[in-house]
Amino acid sequence: LKKDNTGYDLKDLFIGSEGTLGVITAAVLKLFPRPAESATAMVALAEISHALDLFSLAQETAGRSVTAFEFIPRIFIDFVLRNIPGTREPFPKTYPWYVLIEISGAKADGQAAREMEDVLGQAAERGLLLDAVLAGSLSQARDLWRLRESVSEAQKPEGGNIKHDVSVPIAKIAEFIERADRIVESICPGARPLPLGHFGDGNIHYNIAQPVDMSKERFLEFWEPITTAVHELVAEMGGSISAEHGIGRMKRKDLERYKSAVELELMRRIKAAFDPNGILNPGKLL
């Protein structure tokens, strides 16, 4: 049902409740046709701030056909090439930042590739990119996507890591990364920030790898001060401390810190109305 304005939306109430309000026993999924074609490109940037202009250009050119816009720092490419067998350098030279763009089409008429070429051409004219590679086959597209999809596995051999799943307004992504990097360096000199994520919804997986000359145990002692500082910055910039992964047990204190007293009291009242005995996923969220 697309439209239903008959009072409170229980579906939206359950989304994000992490099982604290009830048990979902059935669900109806809306499916969309598989894209008939797609065009994939990796773009090299001098600065993460250029990603915003590139994203705006892609949307102006291809609209809702832009199905992916992922930003990746050079250090993560280094991790992947070093730790994931079979991966390859995407360009002859190295660059500070990369964006993986995908444009999809409902018809196999070449429109996706034409739109991608248009985006890349305009971006080059405006000086937004340093280099770009457009996948010429499904195999080449998979190779580019493997660089992005291998980052989590590639980080493991690098030692301890501190992870954050945050979001900020997309216009503030570059500022957040620049400020967060400086904050992390001031707390733990030599720590290696690894910010990547989904540009279109402002979601930043702000991971941090341990310094090369520090033990994992010593590095993880910085978990609390680093996380507190990162979350404080997120709050200052009007963002969220949990973009995708939820609150669970680990972030309960953070939720109390960054939600207002009114919001928390409303959440508790809703919880009590649905679960007066407190038996639904106790200890989570609230």
Image (cartoon, helix red, strand yellow):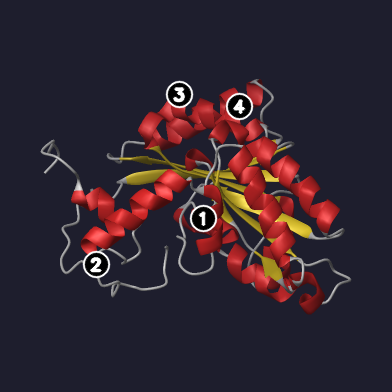
Labelled disc at residue 276: 2
- Give the image location of residue 215, x and y in percent: 83, 77
- Upstream in the sequence, badge 3 or badge 4? 3
- Give the image location of residue 268, x and y in percent: 35, 57
- Upstream in the sequence, badge 2 or badge 1? 1
Other residues around mark 2 within 10 Å, as few (<14) / some (14–19) / many (≥20): few
Q: Residue at x 67, y 58 (%)?
A: 227
| Residue 144 position (above or below residue 263) | below
Reading the image, the residue beneath label 4 is: 123
Question: What's under tag 4, amino acid-wise?
Answer: Ala
Reading the image, the residue beneath label 3 is: 60
Q: Residue at x 76, y 66 (%)?
A: 222
- SS for dot 3: helix
Reading the image, the residue beneath label 1 is: 256
Viewer-closest of 69 and 218? 218
Label 3, label 2: how far apart the Cα atoms are: 50 Å
Label 2, label 1: how far apart the Cα atoms are: 21 Å
Viewer-closest of 229 and 73? 229
- Give the image location of residue 104, x and y in percent: 38, 41
Label 4, label 2: how far apart the Cα atoms are: 57 Å
Other residues around mark 1 within 10 Å, as few (<14) / some (14–19) / many (≥20): some
Question: What's under tag 2, amino acid-wise?
Answer: Pro
- Give the image location of residue 175, x and y in percent: 69, 36
Viewer-closest of 22 and 62? 22
- SS for dot 1: helix
Viewer-closest of 168 and 88? 168
Q: Quadrant of the C terminus?
A: bottom left
- Upstream in the sequence, badge 3 or badge 2? 3
Label 3, label 4: how far apart the Cα atoms are: 12 Å
Q: Residue at x 70, y 48 (%)?
A: 91
- Which of discs 1 and 4 lies nearer the camera? The answer is 1
